C-alpha cells in the first residue's frame, strides 16, 4: 500500500513516522522543509508538491491546520486531481462540516473514496500511536484503511456513513474542551478571590469530581501557568469554537455557551496570546477579576 501524507506538523510528523516504522511506503509533503527532512531520515520519500506526493498513491492522508490549508493542498495544488480511481483520501484534520461535505461530493465525482477521521490526543499521544480516531465514511473505505488506523490509534470510533459526521463530532468535543478550560479559569478566579490557593484548588477538583484527562492536563497547566510550548495553540481553539458555532447554526442548534467562549478567545488574541497553549484561555478570567 502506497501512502501519501500531507502535513508534517506537530501531529502529522509523528503519525507519518509511525506508518513508516510499521513498514508502509510513505511519501510525505510539508509546506516547510524541516519536518519533511526528519521524516526522510526514517526512510520516507519526500515530495516537492502535494500533487507529487499523491501521484499513484493508494491512500492519501492529510493532517493540515485548517480549512484553508486543506483546500490549498488537496484542491488548489492538485492532490485530489491526480489520485487514481479507487484510491482513498483520509482527512484527519479538524475542518468545518461544510468543507467535509464539499470534499465528499468532489471525491465522489472523481471516483475516489473519502473518509473523515479527525483525532483526539496531543503530540505525545500521536507519538505513542495511541490516538482516538473519530471516523466516518463508506463502510468499504473505512475497512480498507482500518489497518492504518490500528497503527495510529488505540481505538477507532465510527461516527457514521457521511464523512461530515466525524467532523461534527470532533468539533463538539473541542467545544467541550474549551468549555472545561473556560470553567476552570472562572472557578480559579473565584477561589483566588477568597484567598484559596490556585494549585491546591485545582489539585482537589481534578483528583475528585473532575478526575478526567482534559481537566487533569489543562488544570495542571493552569496551576503551573505553563503555556509554552503550546501543545495546541489558543488560536486553533478559537478556530474550532467558530466551526462548532457554524455547524450548530447549520442544524438550528443554539450554543450560547460557545458564543461566550468565542468572545473569550477573541479577548485572549487581543492580548497577544494566540500562540500560547489553549490553557492560557484561563488568563482571561484572571484579568477580568483584576488578578492579572
Image (cartoon, rainbow, N blue to C red):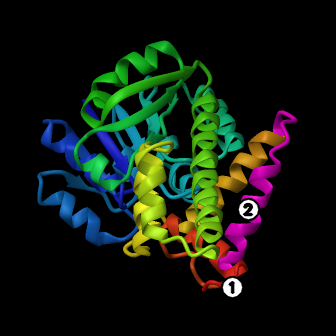
**Left or right: 292 in relation to 253:** left
Label 1: how many residues lie within 10 Å, few (<14), some (14-19) or many (20+)?
Answer: few
* Residue ID at (55%, 47%): 94
* Mark 1 → mark 2, Cα distance in angstroms: 21 Å
Q: Which residue is mark 2?
A: 262
Quadrant occupied by the C terminus = bottom right
| Quadrant assignment, res 190 | bottom right
- In the rendered view, tell whether residue 123 sits above or below residue 143: below
Per the rendered image, the range of residues in magenta is 250-270
Residue under numbered circle 1:
290
Residue 245 versus residue 153 in the image, above or below: below
For this orientation, the residue located farthest to the top is: 140
The reply, left or right, for residue 238 in relation to residue 209 is right
Instruction: Identify the mark nearer the N-term, 1 or 2.
Output: 2
Q: Position of residue 128 (x, y in %)?
A: 22, 44
Q: Residue at x 40, y 55 (%)?
A: 217
Residue 192 circle label: none
Inspect this view and state whether residue 42 appears. yes
Q: Is residue 218 magenta?
A: no
Amino acid at each position: 500500500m502506497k501512502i501519501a501524507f500531507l502535513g508534517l506538523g506537530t501531529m502529522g510528523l509523528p503519525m507519518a513516522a509511525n506508518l513508516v516504522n510499521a513498514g508502509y511506503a510513505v511519501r510525505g509533503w510539508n509546506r516547510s522543509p524541516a519536518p519533511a527532512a526528519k521524516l526522510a531520515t526514517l526512510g520516507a520519500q519526500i515530495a516537492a508538491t502535494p500533487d507529487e506526493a499523491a501521484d499513484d498513491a493508494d491512500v492519501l492522508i492529510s493532517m493540515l491546520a485548517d480549512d484553508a490549508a486543506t483546500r490549498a493542498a488537496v484542491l488548489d495544488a492538485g492532490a485530489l486531481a491526480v489520485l487514481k480511481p479507487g484510491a482513498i483520501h483520509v482527512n484527519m484534520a479538524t475542518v468545518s462540516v461544510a468543507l467535509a461535505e464539499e470534499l465528499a461530493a468532489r471525491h465522489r465525482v472523481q471516483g475516489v473514496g473519502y473518509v473523515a477521521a479527525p483525532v483526539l490526543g496531543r503530540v505525545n499521544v500521536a507519538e505513542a500511536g495511541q490516538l482516538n480516531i473519530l471516523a466516518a465514511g463508506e463502510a468499504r473505505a473505512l475497512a480498507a484503511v482500518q489497518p492504518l488506523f490500528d497503527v495510529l490509534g488505540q481505538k477507532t470510533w465510527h461516527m457514521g456513513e457521511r464523512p461530515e459526521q466525524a467532523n461534527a463530532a470532533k468539533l463538539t468535543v473541542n467545544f467541550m474542551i474549551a468549555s472545561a478550560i473556560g470553567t476552570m479559569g472562572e472557578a480559579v478566579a473565584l477561589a483566588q478571590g477568597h484567598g484559596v490557593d490556585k494549585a491546591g484548588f485545582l489539585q482537589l477538583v481534578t483528583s475528585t469530581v473532575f478526575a478526567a484527562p482534559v481537566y487533569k492536563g489543562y488544570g495542571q497547566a493552569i496551576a503551573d501557568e505553563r503555556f509554552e510550548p503550546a501543545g495546541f495553540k489558543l488560536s486553533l481553539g478559537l478556530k474550532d469554537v467558530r466551526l462548532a458555532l457554524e455547524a450548530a447554526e447549520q442544524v438550528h442548534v443554539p450554543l450560547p455557551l460557545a458564543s461566550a467562549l468565542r468572545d473569550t478567545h477573541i479577548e485572549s488574541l487581543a492580548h497577544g496570546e494566540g500562540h500560547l497553549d489553549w490553557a492560557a484561555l484561563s488568563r482571561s478570567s484572571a484579568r477580568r477579576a483584576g488578578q492579572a
